[in-house]
Amino acid sequence: MGYKNYKDLEVYQKARVFRNEIDDLSKSFPAEEKFNLVDQIIRGSRAVTAHIAEGHGRFHYKEYIQRCRTARGELMETDDHLTVALDRQCIDQETY
């Protein structure tokens, strides 16, 4: 591998930016969504970087790839939660 740490990976760096943007965005959601939609969106976005990091710590390439696949799944789940936020008018189309 041409990197020393998972934090050097472009995919991790982009996922980290996404995670931070989600954290900032979630502060604007209505209070009634705090323990429902906001919690799901935050946990999903944080899981993306967590799975990349965890995969890097595995000893076998196939385990690492599986964690990356899981991270991709978490990203798609977060996208779906953002779609719910759009449908519930917590965010607008441009923000989505």
Image (spheres, rainbow, N blue to C red):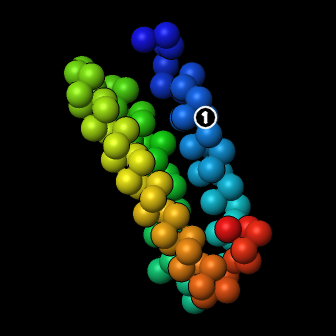
Residue in front for this viewpoint, 25 or 76: 76
Q: Secondary structure at mark 1?
A: helix
Quadrant assignment, res 7: top right
Residue 43 shows in the view:
no
| Residue at the farthest right position | 94
Instruction: State left or right for residue 1 relative to residue 31.
Output: left
Instruction: State left or right for residue 24 relative to residue 11.
Output: right
Badge count? 1
Q: Residue at x 54, y 34 (%)?
A: 11
Above-or-below relation of 81 to 32? above
Above-or-below relation of 65 to 90? above
Where residue 88 appears, as percent x and y from the top left, is 60, 88
* Quarter in which the N terminus is drawn: top left
Where residue 38 appears, as percent x and y from the top left, is 55, 73
Quadrant assignment, res 26: bottom right
Where residue 31 appears, as percent x and y from the top left, is 63, 86
- Give the labeled residue for mark 1: 13
Q: Residues within 10 Å of mark 1 (few under 14, many from 20)?
A: some
Amino acid type, mark 1: Gln
Where residue 79 appears, as percent x and y from the top left, is 52, 64
